[in-house]
Amino acid sequence: MQEEIKNLVAKGEMLPLMEEFYTIQGEGFHKGTAAYFVRIGGCDVGCHWCDVKESWNADLHPPTKIEAIAESAKRSSNTVVVTGGEPLTWNMNPLTSLFKEKRMQVHIETSGAYNLTGFWDWICLSPKKIKLPKEEIYKVADELKMIINSKSDFKFAEEQAVKVNKDCILYLQPEWSKRDKMIPLLVDYVMKNPKWKVSLQTHKYLNIP
């Protein structure tokens, strides 16, 4: 039975589900809108400031049938956000096909470190220095969200911005634990470089998931 489950996970027909919840989108272009979040376990990118490190080990999260995930999402919302962990660790084609059959708007938050699978209405790309995105995802990203943890991250943000398509919206977001130090630098930078917009983790200010 265990081998059968492993095979289903490898195909994307079951996924290690860490959590799922209906909430208000807190970041980026869709901030302030209601959405159902599906957090998939598994990530080896390893950002030291990650606020969901418990998502990294996929073995800690129960393999869940994608039909159950899709049904739960549809009961709550017409918009679903797939996040992690790093969801592209897994084959996202089967899950997103079910979402699309249910006529849902399907979004992803990803580092882009793995091959792009799935059928998406909105792709939020958040590159990490530790493991850079695959080249293919730059062409299709709808928004680029760069986390600013130190001054050197502005240079990295610019290096990533030249790779995305011309319609991609550019965001700079302060790393939460450094926000008091980084926000003044970020605001000044955006005022001098208005192609960028400021993104904040408004859900944390609102004290919601």
Image: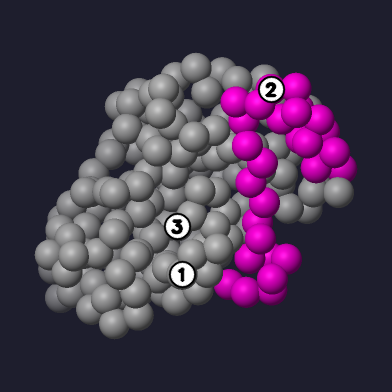
Q: Look at the image and tell me whether residue 59 can be seen.
A: no
Q: Residue at x 37, y 59 (%)?
A: 82
Q: Is residue 41 left or right of residue 1?
A: right
**Dividing the image into 4 quarters, which one contains the N terminus?**
bottom left
The residue tagged 2 is 193
Residue 35 seen from this side:
yes
Give the Cα distance between marks 2 and 3: 30 Å
Marks 1 and 2 in Cβ contact (< 8 Å): no
Q: Is residue 167 left or right of residue 8?
A: right
Q: Residues within 10 Å of mark 1 (few under 14, many from 20)?
A: some
Asked whether 204 falls inside the magenta stretch, the response is yes
What residue sits right under mark 1 in the picture?
34
> What segment is highlighted magenta in the picture?
181-209
Q: Is residue 157 above or below residue 80?
A: above
- Secondary structure of the residue carrying numbered label 3: loop
Give the CA distance from mark 1 to mark 2.
30 Å
Task: From the top left corner, tell me how far across and down residue 58 is, in percent.
Answer: 40, 61
Q: Residue at x 73, y 39 (%)?
A: 149
Give, as a three-letter code, the residue at label 2: Asn
Which residue in the structure is indicated by mark 3? 84
The residue at 58%/72% (across/down) is: 209
